[in-house]
Amino acid sequence: MLRPTGGTGATVAKAALGNEVTLACRNRRMRVTDTHVYMIGNAHIDPVWLWDVAEGYETVRSTFRSALDRMKETPGFVFTCAQGVTYRWIEESAPEMFAEIAERVREGRWELAGGWWVQPDCNLPSGESFIRQALYAQRYFQSRFGKTAEIGYNVDSFGHNGMLPQLLRKCGMRGYVFFRPGPPEKSLPAGLFRWLSPDGSEVLACRPPHHYGTGGFYDKDGMRARVVQAANEAPLGLPEVLCFYGVGNHGGGPTQENLRAIVELQSEPGLSAVHLGSLGAFFDAAQGHAAQLPVVTDDLQHHAPGCYSVHSEIKRNNRTCEDALTTAEKLCALATSFTGCDYPTAEFEAAWQRILFNQFHDIMAGTSIKAAYEEARNSHGYALDVARAHTIRATQTMARQLDTVGEGQAVVVWNPSSWERDAALDLETNVQWPSRVLDESGVELPAQRLQSHATAGSRSRVALRMELPPLGYRTLHVVSGEPAAADSALHVAGTALENESLRVRLDSDTGHVAEITSKTDGTSFLSAPACVPLVLDDQTDTWSHDLTRYTEELGSFTARSTRVVETGPLRGTLRVESVWGDSTIRQDFSLFAGLPIIEVRMRIDWREQFRVLKLVVPTAAAADPLATYGMPFGAISKPCDGHEEPGQGWIDVSGRNASGRKLGVSLLCPGKYGFDALGSTLRMTVLRSPIYAWHDPAKPDPEAEYEFIDQGRQDFVYWLVPHRGDWRQADPLRRLEELAVRPVAHAESTHPGARPRQGAFVTIAPENVVLGALKRAEDDPTALIARLHETKGLATDATVELAGTTWQGLFAPHEVKTLRLSDGRAGEVSMLER
């Protein structure tokens, strides 16, 4: 949404303009002499896209060589370039060229921009990933060049989440430049504006005229036309405007012809205000007009909305790696404090940099060639291996100091979350069934037998439900013997499931969810059958260019069978197997004793082409429905207008039912990022199946053979959370972490220890402030870094007790705070740990 800076009732345009700038000035045809045109020589480089990493690596080297050569030929030329990884490539492969670049940076002729490891997709990575993009790139720039980037640069990314102003500002950046979405896709009050995130953080943001690249064929006349048009489109008629030039995508940068044309234009009458400039100089000048600029408090969408959902594997692997690495860091930070063991800083940095590289917008978006995803799979595997190895090392190093003496097999269960969790988990041990699970006091926990992962007869697997302390652990013992009978309100029969909170009924003919009802007061949360796998036609390219929503329904999957597959005191499950065309889906609908959620495990074997699959949930929130979507570290609410929207793994639709009662339903699914809401119906985009790397206006050859995306099997889990009130009552940010980041359990030998059998390492109040990351400080092995954020969009006064330190502070809505903990003291620092 747009917020005017003037008083009540003022229009955005009128409020945004000061006494010296008027709408008439904006609309009249400008002379170039009135406007300082900052010519930004750049080369947007896709390190991977229609080519692999090896080709991208060489492209970077040849582009940087060209830029250095152009500087020798044209004394005033300034080159602007982003992406820390590309500088790393030059340093390791061409050190003499890197030394030249460092000298040009010192001269002010090579501008470090972006401040991130790559130009990522700016919707899909986690909030912590965005911070690591800056942390590793800015520290690299500082260590090699003695300075950091001040202007964010994501000229080709396909959309920009509304939390970026806070993330940019707290990572040392004061301005931001982007091109997508363009004017037809996103209406803005001006091409230069003050962009605010929910906490009030602000950067100047600019969407320049034209495109970020010119190609290599701009002669003097073509460049003159480009400059004059840019001047005429100066935002709000202000006296400064950006004009980008240079060959991009596959590199190249400014050409000799580009530069010759600009230099010749500078000598023409009326064109002396054309500068071979930098982003920093432009934003310095623009800052002087900040009070006159309009304020935007929205995210910046929609360009290529198919990118939110195409190529399920890269998106799932990214989310899995993010969660695994942040979990490993937390546990290693505890182990370092707990036992004094080494913290693997270098290995974590290397793993993060592989994740960050794969967040490059054409990789993460699913729009690169197939070979790119084979490379990405390998580097994601590296990150997961690092995370797994250090999770094992940390937990078992700490477990050695616990008192685990007791009968049977000891098991230690760790909670990576910063709040007490009512957790349902599966536990496999080498104790044969029948067996019992005892807590720290010897009290038997309710358990339910499950099928072991091993078909060998020597192991058993059980389902448990237990309270886990915040960022803490518990010690259990599994012993032989018949488990005690457990009382339970969980029932499964025919096509119905129910527990203390909910009754769920499936339609035996369709396999769809016919009913979700509160057992407390009989409130129904659905207006029509839900969890419907709906197939739609999708003839768009890989990006879904020029599309805002998918509308052409072809039909829904129909059930072949519905049956009970699990019963017991803790979990009941109904399985639906359904078919459409050549594809099949299996959905396992589960309820847990005592938990007000519905878990669905979905297995798809997809064989369709030029189709999109959505999961449909019509809620009972018929009056005044409002859709809310996850953002990195936050949430954003939007009208239920059917537009395809990016979401950080969740969507909620809330409103009032026919009786006027406020209610809603949240759908959460780690690794899925495309959603829409129309009226009171929410939908998750499960997958799309276009051709790999097909970009309009090219047309597929009907005689050629192509490979289609998302063919074959994929498995994932989603939760439905029906609730009263609005999205905050569902607590989706915490619920999503509970779904994505399961407790870590491992067998342990029995031994005495100085540490108690259970413990917690953090206390945070109130509940809407959580610990997102805990790691060792980059520049101080004795200090810890704690990342905290507010989850419900509410100003909150919080108290945190962690690592023997107590800290109190006020959080603005969705604010992220970074604390340095050292010597019993805690203090707030930037996201760069300064």
Image (spheres, rainbow, N blue to C red):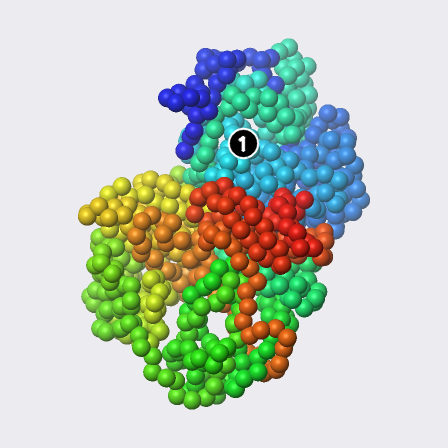
Using the image, determine if residue 339 lies above or below residue 769.
below
Which quadrant of the rendered structure holds the N terminus? top left
Q: Is residue 418 left or right of residue 594?
A: right
State the residue in front, 311 or 743: 743
Whether residue 211 is visible: no
**Percent coordinates x, y for residue 671 in the rendering:** 45, 56
Indicate the secondary structure of the residue bearing disc 1: strand
Using the image, determine if residue 724 lies above or below residue 472.
above
Which quadrant of the rendered structure holds the C terminus? top right
Whether residue 174 is visible: yes
Using the image, determine if residue 720 lies above or below residue 537.
below
Instruction: Identify the residue at horizontal 62%, vertical 63% (top origin).
Output: 334
Question: What is the residue that sits farthest to the top in this orientation?
Answer: 269
**Percent coordinates x, y for residue 100 in the rendering:** 78, 39
- Residue at numbered disc 1: 205
State the residue in front, 24 or 724: 724
Numbered marks: total: 1
Density class for disc 1 (Cα within 10 Å; few <14, some 14-19, many ≥20) is many
Instruction: Identify the residue at horizontal 61%, vertical 82% (top origin).
Output: 751
**Percent coordinates x, y for residue 785 in the rendering:** 63, 53
Instruction: Identify the residue at horizontal 37%, vertical 46% (top origin).
Output: 628
Instruction: Identify the residue at horizontal 53%, vertical 75% (top origin).
Output: 475
Q: Looking at numbered disc 1 in the image, what kind of residue is underneath it?
A: Ala
**Percent coordinates x, y for residue 794 in the rendering:** 44, 43
